[in-house]
Image (cartoon, rainbow, N blue to C red):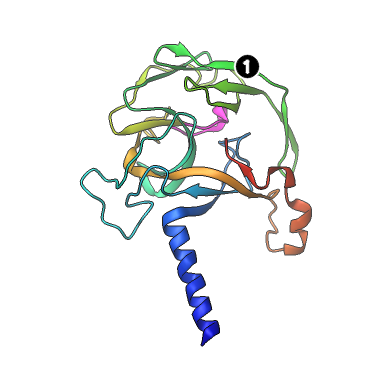
Amino acid sequence: MDILGTVLWAVLLALVFRSFVYQPFSIPSGSMVPTLLVGDYVFVSKFAYGFNRYSLPFWAPPVDGRLFGRLPARGDVAVFRLPADPDQDYIKRIVGLPGDQVQMVGGVLTINGEPVKREPMADLVIDDGAEKLSLRRFVETLPNGVAHEIMQERDDGPLDDTSIYVVPDGHVFAMGDNREHSQDSRMLTKVGYIPLENLVGRADLRFLSIVPHEAWWKIWQWPSRIRYDRTMRSVR
């Protein structure tokens, strides 16, 4: 009976932790390279922006859709439910807040008419398990001082020159760090502006990173596939 009680308490604590505190997510695509790679696993803080029907699925939200709601900060890496298909989770970086004017001009992010500082870095070499890729990399510094890396293969792509996006009240604007390979708020009909009540939480910790491989069930190969330099690192 003691063993059963211990197991039940452990299960209850795990459920509470996952429901109210942190939830694990795996990264399914390369839209957030170099910050997040396919095969990265992150803990997402479910209380960072307050609670809603997506962070607490069993809870009926108040009129405004959030409990203890807080506005994200520019530069946060956030998980949200896709407005067009709430069954899908997306992870992107918040770059625009309610009332902001966001635009891409010649590959450079512009917020409220001011170009965001972008400095070149050495190319990033990524081993995705099948081939090694060398990618053009920059450090981008947002108006609040948050600096993060982005990938920008070119400055004349389809989403490198846009009209001005005016972020509505109660919404944020999110973009992937891999600018040429991200379906994000720049695509209004596919993603668009993110309602605050669609935010699931903020990605805080990359607790594991594994080189992708089709034979995931070969557990004995996992130690050689772990990216130890990316494991147990804060998401920035």
Whether residue 180 appears in magenta in the rendering, the answer is: yes
The amino acid beneath tag 1 is: Glu
Q: Nearer the viewer, residue 146 or 158?
A: 146
Q: Nearer the viewer, residue 55 or 125?
A: 55
Q: Main secondary structure of the magenta part?
A: loop
User: Residue 138's image quarter?
Assistant: top right
Rendered position, 199 above or below 14: above
Q: Farthest residue toward the bottom? A: 1
Residue 186 percent across, percent down from the top left? 43, 27
Residue at point 73% right, 51% down?
A: 226
Q: Nearer the viewer, residue 9 or 126?
A: 9
Rendered position, 207 above or below 215: above
Where's the C terminus, which quadrant? top right
SS for callout 1: strand
Q: Is residue 65 left or right of residue 174?
A: left
Q: Which stretch appears magenta?
A: 175-184
Residue 117 percent across, percent down from the top left? 55, 15
Q: Which residue is mark 1?
A: 119
Tell me the crowding category of disc 1: few under 14, some 14 to 19, or many 20 or more residues within 10 angstroms, Cα based.
few
